[in-house]
Image (tube, rainbow, N blue to C red):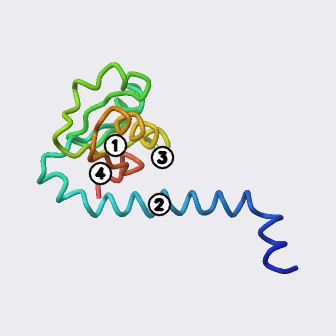
């Protein structure tokens, strides 16, 4: 079996592996930037549900569930970095798109909320 045949046969798995690898790499990159982002006054936003947030959360995070984000944008300043988290990085990725679409310039997805604890 040549490489082209392997890619044709396994492209969904390859794509999934690449996506998961990107999410992992990006969360590590944002975690490394976090001290500098905090010095710049970053707002840390957890977009999990209120129940998830109540069960466990990182200190200093603001809970704005993803489904409420559009109606609560006024709570997030546009002139400082915004670092988003959720349970796995998927909802915070969607929240990043919402904020970017609404004119936020510095928006970072750290992935899982526990990445704030490192």
Residue at 41%, 49% in the rendered image: 111
Q: Which residue is mark 3?
A: 88
Q: Are marks 2 and 3 in contact (CB under 8 Å)?
A: no
Observer-side mark, 3 or 1, equals: 1
User: Quadrant location of residue 8?
Assistant: bottom right
Q: Earlier in the sequence, mark 2 or mark 3?
A: 2
Observer-side mark, 2 or 4, equals: 2
Percent x, y for residue 41?
Answer: 13, 46
Q: Which residue is mark 4?
A: 116
Gap between marks 1 and 2 measured at Cα: 15 Å
Is 84 on the left or on the right of 22, as rendered? left
Disc 4 on helix, strand or loop?
helix
**In the rendered image, which quarter contains the N terminus?**
bottom right
Gap between marks 2 and 4 measured at Cα: 14 Å
Classify 33 as above or below 70.
below
- Residue 24, numbered label: 2
Is 111 on the left or on the right of 42, as rendered? right
Disc 1 on helix, strand or loop?
strand
Residue at 66%, 59% in the rendered image: 15
**In the rendered image, which quarter contains the C terminus?**
bottom left
Q: Earlier in the sequence, mark 2 or mark 4?
A: 2
Q: Which residue is mark 1?
A: 84
Q: Count neighbours of disc 3 (C-alpha within 10 A) and say few if under 14, some if 14 to 19, many if 20 or more.
A: some
Disc 3 on helix, strand or loop?
loop
Gap between marks 2 and 3 measured at Cα: 10 Å
Gap between marks 4 and 3 measured at Cα: 13 Å
């Amino acid at each position: 079996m040549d490489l082209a045949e392997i890619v044709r046969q396994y492209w969904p798995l390859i794509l999934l592996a690449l996506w998961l690898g990107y999410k992992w790499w990006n969360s590590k990159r944002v975690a490394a930037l976090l001290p500098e982002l905090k010095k710049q006054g970053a707002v840390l936003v957890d977009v999990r549900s209120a129940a998830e947030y109540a069960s466990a959360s990182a200190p200093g995070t603001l809970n704005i569930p993803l489904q409420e984000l559009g109606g609560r944008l006024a709570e997030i300043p546009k002139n400082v970095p915004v670092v988003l988290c959720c349970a796995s990085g998927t909802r915070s990725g969607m929240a990043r798109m919402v904020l970017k679409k609404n004119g936020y310039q510095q928006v970072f997805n750290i992935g899982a909320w526990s990445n704030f604890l490192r």
